[in-house]
Image (tube, rainbow, N blue to C red):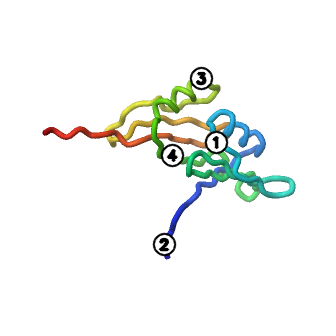
Amino acid sequence: MKANSASAILQVSNLNEAIRFYTETLGFEEEFVFGDPPYYAGVKIGDVIIHLNTGKENETRKGMGSVYVFCDEVDEYYKSIEEKEVEITSKLDTWPYDMRDFQVKDNDGNLLCFGCPVEIEEDG
């Protein structure tokens, strides 16, 4: 078997509010909505899709998820996020693990980290 992708599934309390937060605040696009009434959705930014679930069987996991999104131009993205009403739990910084990233919480407390590798200059 060759695995070719994965998607995090985050538990949320209100699907419509979660979709609105991810699209209007974080810049994702709505990829799909499933169920009647809707209880499951996908939001996408670039090639990254995050699934959002309000299923009763997973209620105890609301707000316990976390996702690290690898991206480019993290500084520009951070500036756009700073201007919006979002809880930034870790400000943009360059870390000893050679990543430049920041972290936010969604409305349910799920953590999303956005970052990119730091270019390491070699002594020459």
Q: Residue 103: where, in percent of width, then height? A: 51, 36
The CA distance from mark 3 to mark 2 is 41 Å
The CA distance from mark 2 to mark 4 is 22 Å
Camera-side residue: 116 or 46? 46
Q: Which residue is mark 2?
A: 2
Evaluate whether residue 101 shows in this view: yes
Q: Quadrant of residue 122?
A: top left
Query: Which residue is most to the bottom?
Result: 1
**Residue at the image position 52 percent from the left and 32 percent from the top:** 77
The CA distance from mark 3 to mark 1 is 16 Å
Query: Which residue is most to the left?
Result: 124
* 10 Å crowding of disc 1: few (<14), some (14-19), many (20+): many
Q: Residue 25: where, in percent of width, then height? A: 65, 33
**Residue at the image position 72 percent from the left and 42 percent from the top:** 19
Q: Which residue is mark 4?
A: 69
Label annotation for residue 83: 3
The CA distance from mark 4 to mark 1 is 12 Å
Camera-side residue: 89 or 32? 32
Label annotation for residue 52: none
Evaluate whether residue 60 shows in this view: no
Q: Is residue 19 above or below residue 91?
A: below
State which tag comes first along the sequence, 3 or 1. 1
Determine whether the residue tagged by mark 3 lies in a helix, strand or loop.
loop
* 10 Å crowding of disc 4: few (<14), some (14-19), many (20+): some
**Residue at the image position 56 percent from the left and 28 percent from the top:** 80
Q: Which residue is mark 1?
A: 28
State which tag comes first along the sequence, 3 or 2. 2
Q: Identify which amino acid the numbered label 4 is placed on.
A: Val
